[in-house]
Every structure is written in C-alpha cells, then in structure tokens.
Amino acid sequence: MRIPNTAAQLKDLIDPQCPDYRLGIILTSEARLWHVCYGLTQFLHPRGEIFLQWTKAKDEKTTGLIYFPGFWNADQLLLTNSQAFSEVLVRRPYAFTKPPAGASLIRRGIGDSLFIAEGDEHRRLRRILQPFFNFRKMHNLYPIFWMKAIDLANATARSDPGKSSEEEFVAEVLWYADKVTLDTIGLAALGKDFKSLTEPHELAKAAETAAPTKLGMQVIFIATALLLPWWALKLIPGGMQKRLNEASEQGIRVCERFVEERKSDEKIGGDVFRQLIDAQVFTDTELVDNLRMIIATGHDPTAATFIWVLYYLSIHPEWQKRLREELHANIPNHFFTSDDDKNHFTAGATLDTLPVLNACINETLRYMPTTPVTSRVADRETTILSTIVPKGTKILIAPYVLNRLVEHYGPTAEDFDPGRWIENNGKANNHGGASTNYAFSTFLHGPRKCLGMAYAKAEIRSFTAAFVARFDFEMADKKEVPVESGMFSTRPRDGLSLRLRKVGGWW
Ligand code: HEM
C-alpha cells in the first residue's frame, strides 16, 4: 500500500471524530497550502496531546500509523503503537535518520556529536561512549548526586535573604534545578564543580542566553522545520538567532579550555572526560563537541523532570506525605545534616530500592516525558508495518502517546497515579502494570535510546529524596497550573513557585 496523498484518502486514515482533524480539513480540503496547520501540530503545547487525541479517536481500527501532511505538504506518519515503534527504533533504526534541518540546528547549538551522528559514525561514537554511562559507573556517581542534592536543598533554604520567615517561604525552584544539574554534570563528566548554584558561571549564562522556554526559540524551531534558510532566521524579532550563536560560541570556548587544561595536566581527575582523553579515541574537535553534548543533554531534561516531580507532588499531597514518611524511615537524619556524613551516604543501595520514591519518579517520567515528540526521516524507500513508506517521509515518534494509552495502562492511563508502580505487597515493580516495555517510551528504545537514562534516574532520585525529606511544600498560588513550554525539554514556562516549609528536625 502506498501512502495516500489526497484529502479524500486522508479521511480513511484519520478518524473524522477527531476534532483537530475537522479543524485541519476545513483549512486543507480546498487549499493544500494551508497544510501548514498540520505541520504545526508537533510544536503545539502540550506537545503530543493532539497526537494522543488522534490516536484515541482511531482506536479500534488503528493500524499503528496515522498519515497527515506537514509543512509544504510533505508526507508525515505518526506512529501509534508498540509494533510501529519497534520497527522504526529497534529493527531498522538506521533506515530512519534525524531530520536534516533539526540536526543542523542542534549542530549549531551543541556541536557535531553522537546526538546527530548517523549510520556507521553513530555506531562508532556510541561504542566509545556507551561504556562510560553503564549502570555500574552511574552508581559510582551517587556520592556526587547526594552531595549536590543537599547543596540544592540548602541553597533553596537560603533563597531571598530578606524573607520574613526562615521556616516558611516562597521560592522559584526551576532556577535552582537548572543550576544544580549543571554543576552536577560538571563534576560527573569533568571532575569540575562549576558552582553556578552560588556564583555566576559562563556555562549557566550560555544556557540562559539560549533560554529554551522563550517564544523566540519556538519560532526558530518552527522556521527550521519550515526549511527556511539560516539567514532568514535573522529576520525573526528579538535577535534569537544572534543569541543562539553567542550561546554556542561561549559553549565552544569554555569546552576548548577544558580540553586544553585536561590535556596539559595528566593528573586531573578520574571522571568520564579524563577516561575519554586517556582512551585516545577522539580528536580534539570530537572531544569538544561530545563534551558540549554531554553538558547540554546531561542537565536540561533532568532539571525539567525533577521540577515536574515537585509539581505533581505538590498537587498530590497524599503522595508527598507517603514519600516523606518512607524517606524518614529509611535514611538516617545525619546524612542530611552533617557535612561529614553527607559524603558517606551509600545512597545508591538505598534510593534504588525505595518503592514510593521510585514510583513517584517513574510515574512523572511516564506522565510528563520531557521529550514528548521527536522525529525521523525515511532515508530510503522502506516499509513500516507492511506499509510502503517513500524516501523522505517524516516519521513522528511521540513517547507522550504510547505512555498514555489505555491499551497499556487501563482506564487510569491519563491520570497521575504512582500506585501503578507498587504491588499490593508494597514492593516496587518496574512496569507500571503494562505488558510491553514500549508503554514507557520516555527514553526511547534501540541503539539511539537515551545514553544518560541511568544517570538521570539516579540524579532525580537523589534530588527528590533530599528535597522532600526536608521540605513540606505546595504551589505558591494554588490555582496556578504551569503552562508547558520549551523546545529542548518540556518545562513550566514561568518556572515553579512553591511555598516551602522546613520539616522540623531535618535541618
Ligand atoms: C530525564 C532525563 C532525560 C530524558 C527524558 C532523556 C530523553 C532522551 C531521549 C528521548 C533521547 C532520544 C532523542 C532522539 O533520538 O530523538 C535521548 C537521547 C540522548 N540522551 Fe537523554 N534524556 C535524559 C537525560 C539525559 C542525560 C542525563 C544524559 C547524559 C548525561 C543524556 C544523554 C543523551 C544522549 C547522549 C542521547 C543521544 C543518544 C544517541 O543518539 O545515541 N540524556 N535522551
């Protein structure tokens, strides 16, 4: 079967019950040019929600694929079931490459690295980098995560020196999350504490310059997907393209300095970067580019996920309370309060096994994947689920959709419910009640699965444990529902302002 390419055939593939379909067809049936509206769907916030609605509307006759035209009337396929995910991500991953326009934007931002490499080059870089991110190595990083988790809680408690009460106050916590995750990846990857939590740092400034929540960044992504040339982006108001260039150049300068420092002093550090230099597998340019990638990918999505954990716990106080009780029962007080002891907590062995902690984090990762939608392009004529897919077809992969399907999680699929990760006997499970691992697609699958999954989970466990054990919290404005935003990682557009109360006896 060839992909249909007329508005009439489109009707067969998209269920007319779907409201967005009707909006689309009104705009598209007469004038194909208006297909730009469908092109926008992958950028609309909450990202992935429209695709979930389409998938649900097709429901009983779903084939695993929904066809819809994109910008400039390009062919696009949305994958809607596990079999389709498996074919694209696991069975034939190299037949589907990252879209060239998006890849070139990422190259400008964080360098020519594993993240956008394809085919044999991707295999080579992955083979080199994978061993540095294995489960055991990530476990060995727990002392760093715990130390930084305590720093995060302490810095939050010190926020706004003029506050009227030291025991109860309001703080915007996304700012702290961004800084502490940057400092943590600095220590883990480079053995270097950027200390951006307490002092200005060039890399934190670069990240703020390219502030991912700004509307301008969204416009840049859309313009790139529209295949507008780079020079045309200069016309976008707000100087976004200039700021992106500045941020990128700043990142290059800082990372080049790190490489020089490291190469000139063989004694520094036993961290990931030292091991990469010693292995002598990368040129200097590759070192700089992959270091930029590790710093960027290693802090932005973990900060965002940690913030969503805090948000869901603030609107589900019953889970917050259960979690705090679990933490107080399992982690002795002095590991939070004593400067000597905080470095000696064997956090890994404890935090990996706490059912409520892991349930709250897994459920947040499921419910709010910070990469809700990603994409590929068929780089040759191929098939997905026996459907012929012409070369150049764009493939939309939405973890947000698979993570919320009733087929996977039952009638509560669209509710936030950490309980699905805990068995009746109180023990943790790692499937959330779903029968396929594609039901949890937050980190994707196959050879391009997130390299930092174990790192991210261990870091978020540490930050959540140290925060929830010591603060009781709720939304500063109880009526506020965060507006989702961000093109790299989905995060609350205006940060997260919490009313925090110090928990007595844990300071
Ligand atoms: C909660 C946190 C995180 C989430 C949700 C996440 C999610 C993802 C996703 C969905 C991808 C695939 C993107 C695509 O191919 O379109 C990815 C790739 C990647 N992630 Fe993560 N990530 C997280 C944290 C991290 C961390 C902490 C690191 C590094 C320390 C990292 C490093 C990478 C790298 C290097 C890739 C590219 C892998 C490849 O193409 O072979 N990520 N991540």
Image (spheres, rainbow, N blue to C red):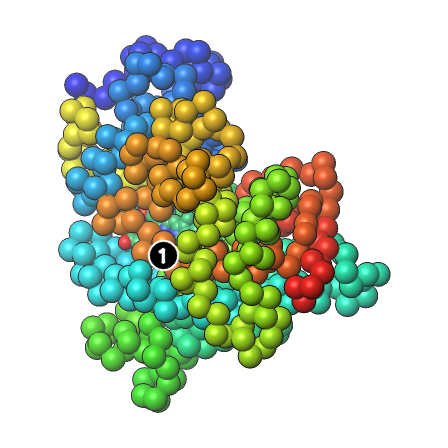
Mark 1 CB lies closer than 8 A to ligand 1? no
The residue drawn where x is 66% and y is 64% is: 506
**Amino acid found under the numbered disc labelled 1:** Ala
Compared to residue 396, the image places residue 108 above or below, namely below
Quick check: 53 left or right of 463?
Answer: left
Q: Could you tell whether 72 is left or right of 502 in the image?
A: left
The residue identified by callout 1 is 454
Residue 73 x, y percent position in the rendering: 34, 27
Local SS, label 1: helix
Q: Position of residue 95 (x, y in %)?
A: 18, 41
Q: Could you tell me residue 365's position as x and y percent?
A: 45, 44
User: Crowding near pointer 1: few (<14 within 10 Å), some, many (20+)?
Assistant: some
Q: Quadrant of residue 36?
A: top left
Whole-percent x, y for residue 137 in the image:
32, 67
Residue at 72% across, 55% down: 501
Rendered-image quadrant of the N terminus? top left
Query: Extreme front residue here?
Result: 425
Name the one closer to the observer, 290 or 241.
290
Q: Is residue 236 above or below residue 424?
A: below
